[in-house]
Amino acid sequence: MTHSQHHEIVVIGAGICGATIANELLERGKAVCIIDAASSPATACSSHAYAIAHPHIGKGSPRLLRLTRIAFLLAEARWGSVWQAHGIFQPTKKDKEFVLEELEDYLNTLELDNTMAVPLNARDAKKVCGISQSGVWLPRGASLNLLETTQHLLQEHSRLTCLWNTRVVRLENRDEKWFLFNEADQPILSADKLVIAAAMESKALANSVGVRLPLKPVRGQLSIFSVAPNDPWAAKLPSVGISGDGYCLPAEHLEDGSYRWIVGSSFDEGEDNLSPRDSSDEFNRAQAKGLVRYFEGDPDGLKKLGEFVGIRCVAGDRLPMIGVLAQRPGIFLATALGSRGILWSALAAKLIATQVLNEDLALLARFGLAADLVAALAPARFFAGALAAPPALGALASNSKPVFPSGPKTR
């Protein structure tokens, strides 16, 4: 191995998360090598052109609710010039009563002011966003083309090295350096610090250094429908995004008078098959009816134009794993982003860069990332007690449930 094959910082995975982390480090003056098995950036879930972004306001742990607000603000600051801020409406759940004052109080506890979240009754929602349902209007909600964004993040740079068509299958520590090996068990290069941002492939890479990550795949299929201008569906199509049981983008009025409407997505837990399925399209047609409350609509009015199938990577508690991999000095993880890749990537860039550069974690407080939130993201939450064991004793098995370090009580 020649000297030129050693890098201070290597990022494995050239999707939206790996690219954002690499870009953050470049902006801080560091040289970065990014490596991917594909021939170009963003070939898996990050090839998605229709991802949406908004703070989470529904069910979830207090930490999740606080984190998605922070992550949304970071994403907005990073990508606000290129994302489509069309607004997103979140309808009231069918089993929930809409009480304006209670919802206002709840949004205040999440520190969401009226520039970010506005509760609306059905009459006002019709005026503001054309939807005759009560719910919450998220005026800064947006969508982002992940493929174009990732490619832009990895454009040519004097301090950026990109290695394509290079699959890393195992890692090994020698003399305080991390060596990366290919499928022929040949060393590819070495690094002082290594960021693993490879979605489900992160599991095998961590396993090669004796750490078992509790990750699982979730298959999702997005459907792209065409609606004829004279079809009854045309009068029901939304001009804003909707996020509820499933989600949809605003309908796009095409030059020929028809409409293009993107609806998703199926949720097939534990599956990693990328083949399109007619059953997933049927599921999304049913989702579409619920999103716009057009239950009597003829599903044949939603003609299939295309689809996008992606495999999301999730952890058991639905929070991402972002941070240093304890007991494996020099390795950092950014995985389990699930369906919130836009948000978690922006947050991961700040947190991982701070840790890689050995900066004071207290600096993250300016973004709202208090110590308890950093702990909630840390991979170590799945290894309570186990990581204290010397590596020689064997693989570090994860607990089935995360164990959060104690911290300030959440609001």
Image: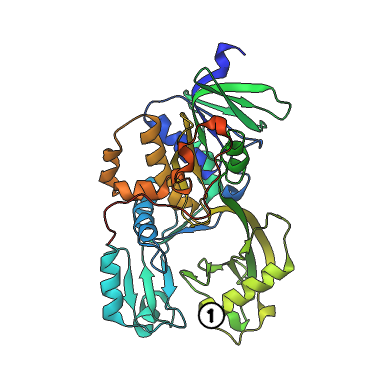
For the point 73% across and 57% down, the residue is: 275
Position of 351 relative to 171 (above/below):
below
Which residue position holds label 1? 236
Residue 243 rendering spot, x and y as whole percentages: 47, 69
Taking the image as drawn, is residue 410 in sight?
Answer: yes
Where is residue 312 drawn, in percent x and y?
58, 54
Residue 49 position by quadrant: bottom right
| Whether residue 155 is situated above or below residue 315 in the rendered picture | above
- Percent coordinates x, y for residue 56 in the rendering: 40, 63
Residue visible at 65% across and 35% down in the picture: 37
Q: Please name the residue shown 29% across and 51% down the image.
A: 407
Mark 1: which secondary structure? loop
Instruction: For the N terminus, give its image quadrant.
Output: top right
Q: Is residue 114 visible?
A: no
Q: Where 400 falls versus 230 (above or below)?
A: above
Direction bottom: furthest residue: 296
Query: For this view, does 384 lie left or right of residue 393?
Result: left
Residue lying at the far top of the rendered structure: 2
